[in-house]
Amino acid sequence: MDNELHNSAHSAEMADARFAAQTPPDASVDREESRIIFQTKQVTMHMAALSNAFDDARFHVGGLDDPRIVTPLGAKVTMTIQNQDGLHSHGWKLINQTPPFAHPQEAASAPPAFPGAEIAHIDPNQQSQIQFTVDRPGVYTYICPELKDKDIGLYGIWEVAPGH
Ligand SMILES: [Cu+2]
């Protein structure tokens, strides 16, 4: 009887809202499963780090929040990460550990899973670019290594698929 209107009021209307909103080249985006699958060994993507002052603390890629990212084994990855949080610095790192994180501090300070797969610090409204090669199959996690509240805040899963 009651027709309830659910207005999903999204407050993520920032100046650069289109950054990281589009499907990266040579990738397919599976919205239902929240997955981005890269088809070639040249992986280029834009990722945005959003504020952790709000509920929507997350990384944004291809229009998805903290998606599972699947890349072929041996892919050369070029990532541009934009910190869209106007107040806090954030970083990015791919680590070997997967959730749940019993010891967030250790996970955050662990070396990156692949050489170069980390940005320690990006100031508010700044961006940075990294390159690395995913030369070991497995399941990894991307996190923000800046632990402000002793907990892993933003994270997502990154799968390096051998037969892909
Ligand atoms: Cu952060």
Image: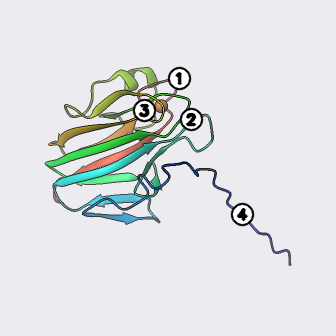
| Residue 37 coordinates in the image, percent (x, y) | 30, 60
| Residue 75 coordinates in the image, percent (x, y) | 16, 50
Q: Give the alpha-carbon distance from disc 2 to disc 1, as whole Å.
A: 10 Å
Q: Amino acid at mark 2?
A: Asn
| Label 4 crowd (10 A; few <14 / some 14-19 / many >=20) | few
Q: Give the alpha-carbon distance from disc 4 to disc 1, as whole Å.
A: 32 Å
Residue pointed to by mark 2: 52
Q: Give the alpha-carbon distance from disc 2 to disc 4, as whole Å.
A: 23 Å
| Residue 87 coordinates in the image, percent (x, y) | 56, 30
Residue pointed to by mark 3: 144
Mark 3 and 4 residues: CB-CB less than 8 Å, in contact?
no
| Label 1 crowd (10 A; few <14 / some 14-19 / many >=20) | few
Can residue 103 be seen here? no
Mark 2 and 1 residues: CB-CB less than 8 Å, in contact?
yes
Which residue is at a point 67% across and 60% down the rendered structure image? 8
**Rendered image: mark on residue 148:** 1
User: Horizontal placement of 134 versus 6: left or right?
Assistant: left
User: Horizontal placement of 65 versus 6: left or right?
Assistant: left
Asked whether mark 3 and ligand 1 are closer than 8 Å, the reply comes as yes
Asked whether mark 2 and ligand 1 are closer than 8 Å, the reply comes as yes
Label 2 sits on a secondary structure element that is loop
User: Horizontal placement of 52 versus 95: left or right?
Assistant: right
Asked whether mark 1 and ligand 1 are closer than 8 Å, the reply comes as yes
Q: Between disc 2 and disc 4, whose residue precedes? A: 4
Q: Give the alpha-carbon distance from disc 2 to disc 3, as whole Å.
A: 11 Å
| Label 3 crowd (10 A; few <14 / some 14-19 / many >=20) | many
Q: Give the alpha-carbon distance from disc 3 to disc 1, as whole Å.
A: 10 Å
Locate the C terminus and report the quarter of the image it occupies: bottom left
Q: Between disc 2 and disc 3, whose residue precedes? A: 2
Q: Give the alpha-carbon distance from disc 3 to disc 4, as whole Å.
A: 30 Å
Label 1 sits on a secondary structure element that is loop
Which residue is at a point 47% across and 66% down the rendered structure image? 32
